[in-house]
Amino acid sequence: MELAPYQRIANDIREQIADGRLAPGDRVPSTRRLARNWDVALATATKAMTVLCREGVLQARPRSGTVVTPVSGTGTTTPTAPGAVTRAGRASRSAERELTRERVVRVATEIADAEGLDALSMRGVAARLGVATMSTYRHVASKDELVVFMADAAFGELDYPGPLPDGWRPLLERASRTLWALFRRHPWLAQVTPLTRPLPLRNLLRHGEQMYLALDGFDLDATMRLDLQVMLYSHIQGLAVQLEREAQAQATTGLSEDQWMDLHGPALGALAASGRYPGFAALMTAFDGRGYDLDLDKIFELGLQTLLDGLAILLSRRAQLSEAD
């Protein structure tokens, strides 16, 4: 009997592990790449990965994609035993009875964490859960609604236990660092909440409340207070967008950041040597032999402190003007 497409994909990965082409800890192609290489739907590739994860052959790791587990099986295909289809059917019905919105959201978040928001689909979530696609629609009306639930749950993972820091600056630092930690944990969040189209997320407002509280003691009108919050949020979200884009680029091209730089390094060197960009050439010379380490955590702190230094000057000037009046 001819194997289903997802079974052929799973068998191919098992064979690559068995003959050493994929070693323990190696990253396997993303579901997006598998779907493209095998000319199948994304949900089909997701189902193949899910089967291998359930067998313990593969392991999904947030932001690293799916890797070969440190201790895998033999890599051989296990024949389908008599009655296996019946058992699978019973297991599927049991999974549907146990299905909840929380489980759907949790599994969807795991997919987005591992492979990005573009890899998320209702069929893929259903395949990971081992249920029919229509079963998920009993708990979530659409993918768009699912993403809203995911975002609200993600923003609620970190809170602000007391006591409150003393002063406006520590309050803003705490709120900003908490948001950065959440975007770091779930980079896809940066794609969900554009500034021009805010979503009514209760848990996101909890972070905004911390920023409102920090600026409460100053003579600032509503527009200025919101402008300052937007400025800080933009700094955090803008950096977080790069996390998600890097994950997408790696999934699409199969190249790591270092491999990408190795590929395009000669072209950048040629631009520096052209004589048209002396500033860029000086930078390239300064980093010659060791390269530039793009540390987004360091840039986040640099940007945060620079913004808060400027805000301190602004608040001081406004206080002086108020006293003069």
Image (spheres, rainbow, N blue to C red):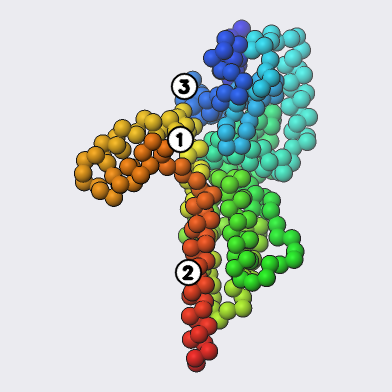
- What secondary structure is found at the residue carrying circle 1? helix
Sequence-wise, which precedes: disc 1 or disc 3? 3
Residue under label 1 = 257
- Foreground residue, 41 or 255? 255
Instruction: Choose top left, top right, bottom left or bottom right for residue 50.
Output: top right
Do we see residue 184 in this rendering?
yes
The answer to whether residue 159 is above or below residue 44 is below
The answer to whether residue 312 is above or below residue 198 is below
- Foreground residue, 188 or 38? 188
Residue beneath the point at 69% across and 32% down: 129
Sequence-wise, which precedes: disc 2 or disc 3? 3
Sequence-wise, which precedes: disc 2 or disc 1? 1
Residue beneath the point at 76% across and 17% down: 86
Give the percent coordinates (x, y) of residue 297: 54, 49
Give the percent coordinates (x, y) of residue 120: 56, 37
Check disc 1 and give the amino acid type: Glu
Residue 310 is tagged as 2
